[in-house]
Amino acid sequence: MRFGTDGKGQTFIEWNRGKPDTNGWARAWISHREGDKDWAATGRYLNATRIDAPGGGPSGTGLDFPIDSPLTDHDILRAYVISVSAITGHSPDSAG
């Protein structure tokens, strides 16, 4: 797993969601929104999509999940990756 900040100042995480040595890279990020773009009136949204490789931009538009949690952006992203990895059976730590 690798945390970073994108060009819009949004916190993101990248990880290989597939088996080790496969190209199953994904990125999740937290977007902060106001006005009409804040459709759920929460101010924050969790987004996720595939990427072609670590450091690459998103390949497609991910769904946006409104966030009402008081957790930090970093903690939400970490929990998301760990939860998805537990469900799929692919450890994010083994996919260097």
Image (cartoon, rainbow, N blue to C red):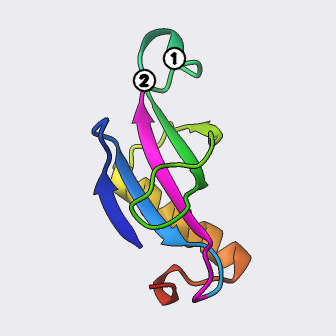
Name the outermost residue toward the top.
36
**Residue 80 x/y as whole percent:** 54, 61
Residue for badge 1: 37
Report the span colored magenta: 20-32
Callout 1 secondary element: helix
Callout 2 secondary element: loop
Q: In the image, what residue type sits under mark 1?
A: Lys
Residue for badge 2: 33
62 relative position to 36: left or right: right
Question: Which residue is at 39% across, 53% downward?
Answer: 12
73 relative position to 29: left or right: left
Disc 1 packing (10 Å; few <14; some 14–19; many ≥20): few
| Residue 75 higher or lower than 20, as above or below | above
Quadrant of image for the N terminus: bottom left
Contact? badges 2 and 1 (CB < 8 Å):
yes
Answer whether residue 54 is magenta in the image. Answer: no
Judge by depth and name the residue closer to the eye, 51 or 88. 51
**Residue 54 x/y as whole percent:** 43, 67
> In which quarter of the view is residue 21 placed?
bottom right
Judge by depth and name the residue closer to the eye, 66 or 36. 36
Which labelled disc corresponds to residue 66? none
Question: Which residue is at 62% across, 82% downward?
Answer: 22
| Residue 13 higher or lower than 93, as above or below | above
Answer whether residue 27 is magenta in the image. Answer: yes
Disc 2 packing (10 Å; few <14; some 14–19; many ≥20): some
**Residue 7 x/y as whole percent:** 29, 40
Judge by depth and name the residue closer to the eye, 9 or 79. 9
How would you classify the magenta stretch by its main secondary structure? strand
**Residue 96 x/y as whole percent:** 44, 85
